Image: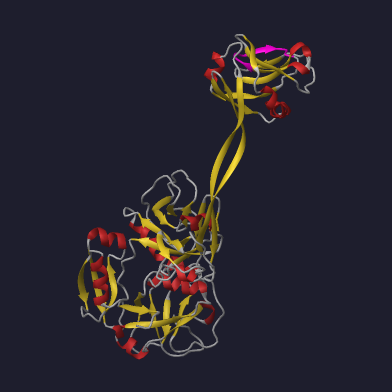
Amino acid sequence: MKVIVNGKERKLKDGALLKDALKGEQYVPGTVVAIHKSTESLRVESDDFEVMTNKGSFCIHLNGSEYARVWKASMPSIKGCTARWSTHNITAFGAFPTDLKVDRGEYMYQRYDCFFSLGGFDNSTTYLMVAKDNHKWGYGAGSAIVGRVTRGRHVIDSLVETDEILSIEPVVSETFTENYELTTDLEFRLDEGNKVESYIKIKLDMDAPESAEHMMVLTQRGYITATHVSGSYVASDDDMDIKIASETKGVREVGSVYVRSTGVGTGRMFFYKERRQMGESFNHVGDVEVGRSIIASVRENDRITVVTDPPRRLAVGMTMAEGERMLSEAGIKVERTGDSDDSAIVAEQIPEMTVTAIRDGKVQLFGVKKEDIYRVQLDDTFEQDVHYFRKVTGLSHKSVGTLRVHFWFPGMTMVTFEGDYDKGKSLYPGEPFKRCKRGDLGLTNQACDHHGLIGVRVEASKEFGPTGEEPYGTNIFGKFAGDLDKFTDSLEDGKTVYITERKL
């Protein structure tokens, strides 16, 4: 059987499963897949009716009143009626019977109102009237307005006695709805003609380097989470601890992607399902080229596989040879600095942002020996502290981060590193330690003046933590997993050291 997978036709065995269709496709296990099953046509009758005469047609829009009900019931009788008279005020078609009650009062009529009148105040001779001018009169059936002529008004002015109503038909609108099923079940059985979308592909705005980079950082695991879903957008709050410059603005079209750049919720990513006006607090990130069915159907807390065009071009954490090869494929020239050996690990890339690197056409890579990058083990149960550490060191967006030595001299029982004083204000105290072990990684919480300072304990202590604070002022959130003696032998104030969570 044939199915369409991410826009490409695939031939599969009858009864194939979703996992068969996704072989070789971009897909992160556990993320949602949209399966297009059919396009359904829905015919809906409106309150508009087309009246065909021998002079042409006009449309009446019913007003939903009781008189409109009488109109619908009387349509078979009205068909075939002729214009019995035509004046400067009205044109009258009839006659036909109704169950309308007599009302001799006078009522106001606007041009193109459609209403009933009773000839001789007798409902067995009811007429359909069309007002050709604004006027007030008593036609025997009360106001009896059924609706107004909305189209073909020129026909009304051309009608004369003996012109005939040939037919009356309801105006029918036809809408098409896409029938999608969203699933994470790879055992889902496919049918002939199914269309499958396993990811969304975003064409990034090359005039918005910071916004584009934020998207690439969000999707470095291959997916994002739909944290908010409304009728007009899907939003992701995966990383809002950022600062971002004001970049490209525009009307937020269907399929566009924007990020909030100022105000409450800075960093929140929006995928639009409906058109919205331009907002000064929103930067254009890019546009969804593949996977709009996923955006249309996704539910809150679903995960979505995301691919960006261009893909991220960051060599940090690769060997010098791997990094240069990857960047060269994108047409970016590389200047090697530091340890330039092929086996050296790229610790820094200037510039880091992909769009800027592509635009400039060149980057500088700084390499270090693998043994000079030290591994840390972080305990994610201490969420606020680990988040802070990754943000300060850069591990939140790259595999090799940096720490700058704040204070050290040989023989000290700890080594401290610079933190972020402002971010440190929000570091709430955790459970005080009973004994701080050698290699413990910690920080100074908001209970102390030097909040945000980071440290590693070189000698165990029951009294002081990795930054020299007492237990109440210390949050321990991980361990230094490298060779601590080798590490401290090379330290000095102000030195930049490189760390990673990976095994290189």
In this rendering, position of residue 65 left or right of residue 282: right
> Considering depth in this image, is 264 or 458 the residue closer to the camera?
264
> Considering depth in this image, is 347 or 273 the residue closer to the camera?
273
Percent across and percent down for residue 287 are 40, 53
If the image is split into quadrants, where does the C terminus sit?
A: bottom left
> Does residue 188 show up magenta in the picture?
no
Callout count: 0
> Considering depth in this image, is 327 or 388 the residue closer to the camera?
327
State which region is magenta: 130-139
In the image, residue 281 above or below residue 350: above
In the image, residue 195 above or below residue 336: above
Q: Kindly identify the residue that appears in the image at 75 percent across and 18 percent down.
A: 141
In this rendering, position of residue 230 left or right of residue 124: left
Percent across and percent down for residue 99 are 78, 23
Percent across and percent down for residue 234 are 51, 56
In this rendering, position of residue 289 left or right of residue 319: right
In this rendering, position of residue 176 left or right of residue 199: right
Whether residue 243 is visible here, answered yes or no, is no
Occupied quadrant, residue 174: top right
Whether residue 33 is visible here, answered yes or no, is yes
> Does residue 138 show up magenta in the picture?
yes
